[in-house]
Image (spheres, rainbow, N blue to C red):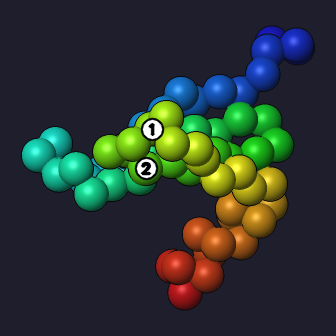
Amino acid sequence: MPGLARDTGWFKSSRSTAASDNCVEVRMLDNSVWVRDSKAPDDGLLSFHSTAWNSFLTSLKA
């Protein structure tokens, strides 16, 4: 629908276990991706342009 922004909400990797506190959480928006520490979500976040994030993921998979 036009006018609706993409926002996935905060999520952890599907490879994270429920018992693990050593994770990062990711939130994907239209043109940016935010990353924060799951143990300290109020301590700040990193923000990346979605193009940079996609390049990062591609390099991890290579």
Query: Which residue is label 2 attached to?
Result: 37
Task: Report x, y in % for residue 36.
Answer: 51, 47
Considering only vertical position in the picture, is 29 above or below 33?
A: above
The residue sitting at the left extreme is 19
Can you tell which mark lies on residue 18? none
**Circle 2 residues within 10 Å: few <14, some 14–19, many ≥20:** some
Image quadrant assignment for residue 44: top right
How far across and how far down the image is residue 1, in percent?
80, 12
Classify mark 2: helix, strand or loop: strand
Residue that protrudes farthest toward the right in the picture? 2
Above or below, 48 against 28 in this view is: below
- The kind of residue tagged 1 is Pro
The residue beneath circle 1 is 41
- Residue 22 image position (x, y, % from top left): 27, 57
Given the image, on which type of amino acid does mark 2 rest? Answer: Asp
Question: Is 61 displayed left or right of 33 in the figure?
Answer: left
Q: CA distance from mark 1 to mark 2?
A: 6 Å
